[in-house]
């Protein structure tokens, strides 16, 4: 059965008392169109043409034709200027074109097959890993240096693709590559972040404002390792990571709510297990379970993690449990456990901010962000 056919009733179940936990435990425990617009078959000619205007004639052509590192860096600067010129002249794909990409992402996630290959067989398990791709591609931003973030889609390159925090994300990148081949005009940064928006919205989450404008960079733009959260650490580490990006305590706790989706895999992060009983439904259950369940340290040969004492089927990372121990974090986590609408509102704002980190404002094609329609919106 297609995800499209079952999405709406599952949403209603997730938000009603009839969505019974016992049923979810059994069913959801698991190991973790469109044509391309004819006038925009490729960005190459556009960038070269606009680049020639920005920097002057043959210089631009040299940058795009040379393979030297200096030329690559100059080429990226040229493309950034070209992107700004595109915005100024409105020479860009329309919102409707990006909606087609969104729809294709939802379709590919639906048809991708069972990502986890475990007991819970469903064709929309790719949603959580696609969300993780968008998160990790954006969460490397350093506001002090202006480096990292979603602008250059640098996870395409080593060593970033091999960073421990990105283990397993080749699955999502390969899935997105299928869409990139179909819509060659979209940048990888725009594609990955739009996929994150689609994953949240199509799994019953809030609408997330988004706008395009990211460009693709080179290996020289790869940020250093260690900019993403280390799950074994405590409150100070979390603040160091998120404050570096420009987030405050409230936004930190809101973004942690993405752990409502998916699960950890022992063969990737070393940790194992889902955070909630409904890991493919975007809810505030992550916060509810943090406070409602009794958590104990798991006795196993893996890294330190917690498990729920009652069923031993759920897990929490040390950085998750900190939300119940730190006074400031706890205040927001408890508020989100009590009010799903508040969580949705705050997550939407924080996630939209995350996805734009590292992107110069002049590159965006719209002064205001867009709300992309879900598949259900379009079919209603």
Image (cartoon, rainbow, N blue to C red):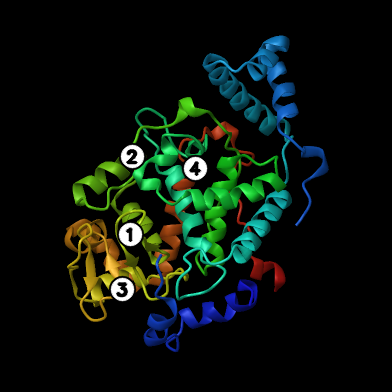
Quarter of the image for residue 122 reads bottom right
Horizontal and vertical percent position of residue 307:
23, 70
Q: Earlier in the sequence, mark 2 or mark 3?
A: 2
Seen in the picture, residue 346 relative to 92 is either above or below; the reply is below
Residue 235 at what x, y percent from top left?
Answer: 20, 51
Q: Secondary structure at mark 2?
A: loop
What residue did someone put label 1 on? 266
Frontmost of labels 2 and 4 is: 2
Q: Which residue is the site of mark 4?
A: 356
Q: Are marks 3 and 4 in contact (CB under 8 Å)?
A: no
Which residue in the structure is indicated by mark 2?
Answer: 227
Q: Quadrant of residue 17?
A: bottom left
Tell me the quadrant of the picture where the N terminus can be found. Answer: bottom right
| Marked residue nearer the N-terminal end (2 or 1) | 2
Q: Earlier in the sequence, mark 2 or mark 4?
A: 2
Q: Which residue is mark 3?
A: 288
Residue at position x 31%, y 39% in the image:
226
| Helix, strand or loop for disc 1 | loop
**Residue found at x 56% / y 17%:** 74
Q: Residue at x 45, y 38 (%)?
A: 149
- Mark 4 lies on a secondary structure that is loop
Residue 151 higher or lower than 314, as above or below: above
Q: Disc 1 vs disc 4: Cβ atoms closer than 8 Å?
A: no
Q: CA distance from mark 1 to mark 3?
A: 25 Å
Left or right: residue 16 versus residue 301 is: right
**In this view of the protein, can residue 368 be seen by the observer?**
no
Q: CA distance from mark 3 to mark 4?
A: 29 Å
Seen from the viewer's position, the closer of residues 52 and 276 is 276
């Amino acid at each position: 059965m297609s995800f499209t056919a079952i999405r709406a009733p599952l949403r209603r179940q997730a938000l009603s008392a009839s969505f019974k936990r016992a049923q979810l435990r059994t069913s959801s425990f698991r190991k973790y169109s469109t044509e391309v617009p004819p006038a925009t078959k490729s960005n190459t000619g556009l960038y070269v043409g606009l680049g020639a205007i920005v920097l002057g004639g043959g210089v631009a052509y040299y940058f795009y034709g040379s393979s030297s590192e200096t030329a690559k860096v100059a080429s990226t600067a040229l493309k950034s200027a070209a992107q700004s010129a595109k915005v100024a002249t409105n020479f860009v794909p329309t919102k409707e074109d990006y909606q087609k990409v969104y729809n294709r992402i939802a379709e590919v996630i639906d048809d991708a097959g069972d990502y986890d290959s475990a007991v819970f067989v469903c064709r929309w398990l790719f949603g959580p890993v696609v969300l993780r791709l968008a998160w990790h591609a954006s969460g490397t931003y350093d506001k002090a240096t202006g480096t990292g973030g979603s602008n250059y889609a640098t996870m395409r390159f080593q060593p970033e693709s091999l960073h421990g925090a990105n283990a397993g994300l080749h699955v999502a990148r390969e899935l997105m590559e299928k869409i990139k081949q179909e819509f060659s005009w979209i940048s990888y940064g725009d594609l990955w972040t739009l996929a994150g928006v689609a994953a949240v919205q199509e799994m019953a989450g809030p609408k997330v404002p988004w706008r395009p404008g990211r460009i693709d960079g080179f290996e020289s733009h790869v940020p250093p390792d260690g900019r993403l959260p280390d799950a074994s650490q405590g409150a100070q580490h979390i603040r160091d990571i998120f404050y570096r990006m420009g987030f405050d305590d409230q936004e930190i706790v809101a973004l942690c709510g993405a752990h409502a989706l998916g699960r950890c895999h022992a063969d990737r992060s070393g940790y194992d297990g889902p955070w909630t009983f409904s890991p493919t439904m975007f809810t505030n259950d992550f916060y509810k379970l943090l406070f409602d369940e009794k958590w104990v340290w798991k006795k196993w040969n893996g890294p330190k993690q917690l498990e729920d004492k009652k069923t031993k089927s759920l897990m929490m990372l040390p950085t998750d449990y900190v939300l119940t121990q730190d006074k400031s974090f706890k205040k927001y986590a408890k508020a989100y456990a009590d009010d799903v609408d508040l969580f949705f509102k705050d997550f939407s704002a924080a996630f939209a901010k995350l996805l734009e980190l590292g992107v110069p404002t002049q590159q965006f094609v719209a002064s205001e962000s867009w709300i992309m329609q879900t598949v259900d919106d379009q079919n209603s």
